[in-house]
Image (cartoon, rainbow, N blue to C red):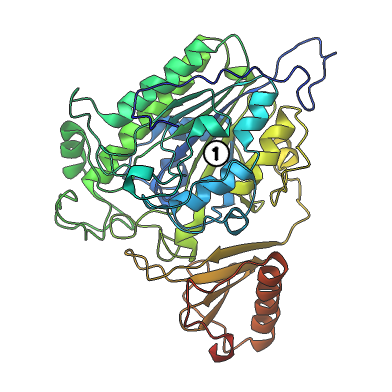
Amino acid sequence: MKRRDFMKTASAGAAAMALPFGIDLNDQSGKKPNIVFILADDLGRADLGCYGNNYHETPHIDKLAGQGMKFNQAYAAAPVCSPYRAAFMTGQYPARVGITDYMRWVSDPLSTDHITIAEMFKRAGYKTGLVGKWHLTGYKDKGAKDEVFPEEHGFDEAIMWEKVKSDHGFKHWFNDQNEYLTDRLGKEAVNFIERWKDQPFFLYFSHYAVHTWLGAKGHLTDKYKFKKRTGRYKPGPYRNTLKVFKDQYVTPHLAANLESLDDTVGMVMEKLDALGLAENTIVIFTSDNGGEEFVTSNHPFRAGKSTLYEGGIHEPLIVRWPGKVPANTISNVTTSNFDFYPTLLDAAGINVDPKQKLDGLSILPVLKNPQYKIDRETFYWHYPLEKKHFLGGRSSGAIRHRDWKLIEYFDTGEIELYNLVDDIGEKNNLANKNIQKKEELYKMLVDWREKNNFVIDPACANYDPEKRN
């Protein structure tokens, strides 16, 4: 397929199946819920006002939380970009998909052997669209063996820009139009909703913000430059993160960047209200991994993007569905982003295709009742790296079982053990104090890897489980 630069919209010609999975043809209302899935890039949970931030200004996201359900125990399936997106698209652990690290220009694409969530909605008669970041393919002219675009994974429209001009989102302005990228993506999302307002639609609105470099509008940057920082955001020297990449505090650029992202959430909500679609639209807001700790604070969590500490994988998650999801509620149910696939299909009355194995579970009962308990106690992460991530993350695996979490480092065999109830900041490693719990969780993690044939070698050739502590 020919490479598509940003602003080229592709429409797939194949018609939807005549009898889509799970659709009740006797449903007199004929109304299936629209889906708007808004994904921020590298946004930490602690960066939002509704999660306690008093420096950033996110009124539209905060309003969304007040109108829906906010999750306190939402996880990403990986601490970096591409594996998260693969898990969202497939409903599987990234290791099962075969994408465990962020994709380079020469990386193999997400295989079309998978039946993606977009394909499932397309089969069910939905108009499907991606606005923004894809990051699930390499490119042939950069040395990749193959390249696969969103249209081949079930999207009727793909409005994207990530190959030449953006370097996966590092730049924020159109060179030829002098238009702020985040603003333009918001306009395209609203236009998609306007175009398909008369039929069910599935919109994957995938931001590049707030990924570094933190390009932002000058007047907003100036606004935050002089705004007082309180609490955990310690006063410090103003640093332009376009030039200096080592600001330990929340920077004016990040705050300005986030405010622009928040404005696009407001644009989407306003359009849904204006078209009378809000009551029948599920809006989800979340992020693909934790914030970069060089430019933000993920407090109370430790570390950030690229690590399996809570700061790297603990995400904001807000779901609004008026009349179905109770407003201004909080859920403490533990969930991961591979749960979106079965949950959204469940909400739309679409049966899962048995050919697509799912690791996720539907949390629709939780959305209807925040007190509902999911019968699931264990989550896993498999994150093999050939070398240390440039932000500090190491080749590793992890397991969370109930209140306990174990991290195993593949490069040294080190093991860390934490009780997340007593120590959410993961400061007190109990691996040498609670041997029984360490062995219990370590065995579960190894058994899970072996059962699923999730390998460590050759990504970490020096790994020796006999040398673990």
Q: Is residue 308 left or right of residue 263?
A: right
> Looking at this view, is 158 or 277 the one in front?
158
Q: Is residue 53 above or below residue 439?
A: above
Q: Residue at x 43, y 15 (%)?
A: 191
Q: Is residue 359 above or below residue 410?
A: above
Label 1 CA crowd tier, 10 Å (few <14, some 14–19, many 20+): many
Q: Quadrant of the N terminus?
A: top left
Q: Residue at x 66, y 72 (%)?
A: 445
* Residue 311 placement (x, y as % from top left): 45, 60
Q: Is residue 323 above or below residue 213?
A: above
Quarter assignment of residue 464: bottom right
Farthest residue toward the right? 26
Which amino acid lies under the numbered mark 1 shown in the image of this protein?
Ile
* Residue 264 placement (x, y as % from top left): 38, 27
Q: Quadrant of the C terminus?
A: bottom right
Q: Can residue 278 be seen here? A: yes
* Residue 74 placement (x, y as % from top left): 57, 51
- Residue to which mark 1 is pinned: 318
> Looking at this view, is 358 or 294 the one in front?
358
Q: Residue at x 51, y 55 (%)?
A: 314
